[in-house]
């Protein structure tokens, strides 16, 4: 067969070249065209949660036209970090439940999602049931001891005129058992936040002690010069403060150390103004202990719970009054605003007298929390 000339293919070649040019122009136009503006993903308008037993219920209100296709809930349990907790598709119920031990501290937050995009987070506020008044996680290694709840009740460490240090370890604080090894949290003007006010009230502390620290407490040798049988972990006000006192302390009995909850009404122990409840579970070396003290001001009774094990309620004396520490009282050599401070690691100063070395706590505290039932 005779060879075909290039001229015979020229129409086809021209057609192919024209098609390629057209495609190239079209591609260039696409590349040069401005990208469609991405829709802004809006955060949740508001979020709340309630707790009942081991169940938390989270409710939220999305923002109109938020651009989301789902909502993701995250939680921070016992300050162990934020993790995924639940997800719900947009258009579904605006409520989710989450299982969390009643003895655990917990925070929730929520965000809008679509694809891999996510909005800013919205913090969920606890309402109803037990409401956190303040919670201190001791995350910062310097600066104020920050309150992670909405009240911003921040604290400080140490007292310049007293020996002792607080070692801030980023998630915990170490107390050395000296009078100045203390965290002081002013609550002036916020008595209703930190008093039972005739209702239900509880305070929680998570701590640990080494074998040597436990033995020092058992031997009454936290301070060898001042033997003691109890060591203050967390409290508001002094023993004879006007309106009373609430506190958690470590006590020694039968050669072992235990957590104990205490409430006073301010009339003096000998006058029936004291109720206390000691845990039946001895403190073990290097084991984190979450001790929760719950005071029912209406029923005049107190209960201690350690790592989920609750003791029986202890009824206060029949004549017991309300536990409502006030801001002022006369103590020592002058007037002291003892009820205006929550302390961790030791008791507050008393009037013009110094912090005494007879019962400072020696060990590590991971968080402290105060709650009220609404």
Image (tube, helix red, strand yellow):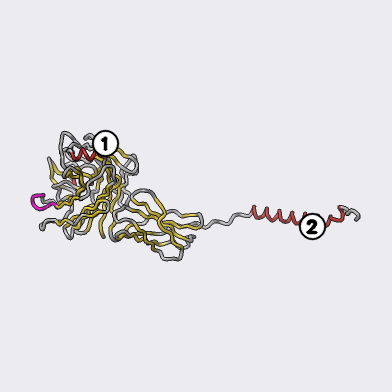
The residue that appears at 10% across and 53% down in the rendered structure is: 272
Dots 2, 1 in contact, CB < 8 A: no
Residue in the foreground of this view, choosing between 117 and 53: 53
Taking the magenta stretch, the answer to whether it contains residue 75 is no
What residue sits right under mark 1 in the picture?
165
**Residue that sits furthest to the right in the current view:** 2
Residue 113 position in % (x across, y down):
47, 57
Is residue 270 among what the camera can see?
yes
Q: Secondary structure at mark 2?
A: helix
Q: Quadrant of residue 94?
A: bottom left
What residue sits right under mark 2 in the picture?
15
The residue that appears at 20% across and 54% down in the rendered structure is: 311
Q: Is residue 274 left or right of residue 63?
A: left
Residue in the foreground of this view, choosing between 96 and 260: 260
Is residue 122 among what the camera can see?
no
Residue 194 position in % (x across, y down):
23, 52
Magenta part of the chain: 269-274
The residue that appears at 32% across and 44% down in the rendered structure is: 138
Q: Residues within 10 Å of mark 1 (few under 14, many from 20)?
A: many
């Amino acid at each position: 067969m005779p060879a075909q000339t290039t001229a015979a293919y020229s129409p086809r070649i021209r057609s192919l070249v024209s098609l390629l040019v057209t495609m190239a122009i079209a591609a260039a136009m696409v590349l040069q065209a401005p990208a469609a503006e991405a829709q802004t993903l809006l955060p949740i308008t508001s979020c709340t949660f309630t707790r009942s037993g081991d169940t938390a219920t989270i409710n939220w209100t999305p923002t109109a036209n938020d651009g989301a296709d789902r909502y993701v809930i995250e939680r921070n349990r016992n300050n162990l970090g934020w993790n995924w907790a639940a997800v719900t598709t947009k258009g579904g119920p605006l409520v989710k439940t989450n299982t969390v031990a009643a003895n655990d501290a917990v925070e929730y937050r929520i965000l809008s999602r679509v694809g891999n995009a996510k909005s800013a987070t919205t913090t969920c506020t606890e309402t109803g049931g037990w409401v956190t008044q303040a919670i201190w996680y001791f995350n910062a290694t310097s600066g104020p001891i920050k309150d992670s709840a909405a009240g911003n009740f921040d604290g400080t460490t140490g007292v310049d005129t007293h020996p002792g240090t607080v070692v801030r370890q980023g998630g915990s604080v170490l107390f050395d058992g000296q009078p100045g090894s203390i965290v002081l949290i002013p609550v002036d003007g916020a008595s209703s936040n930190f008093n039972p006010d005739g209702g239900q009230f509880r305070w929680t502390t998570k701590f640990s002690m080494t074998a040597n620290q436990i033995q020092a407490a058992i031997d009454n040798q936290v301070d060898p010069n001042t033997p003691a049988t109890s060591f203050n972990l967390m409290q508001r006000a002094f023993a004879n403060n006007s309106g009373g006192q609430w506190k958690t302390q470590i006590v020694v009995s039968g050669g072992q150390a235990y957590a104990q909850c205490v409430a006073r009404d301010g009339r003096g122990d000998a006058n029936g103004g004291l109720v206390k409840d000691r845990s039946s579970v001895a403190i073990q070396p290097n084991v984190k202990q979450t001790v929760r003290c719950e005071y029912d001001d209406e029923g005049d009774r107190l209960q201690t719970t350690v790592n989920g094990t609750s003791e029986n309620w202890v009824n206060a004396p029949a004549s017991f009054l309300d536990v409502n520490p006030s801001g002022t009282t006369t103590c020592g050599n002058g007037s002291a605003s003892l009820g205006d401070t929550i302390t961790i690691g030791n008791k507050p100063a008393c009037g013009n007298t110094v912090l005494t070395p007879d019962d400072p706590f020696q060990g590590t505290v991971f968080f402290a929390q105060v709650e009220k039932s609404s």
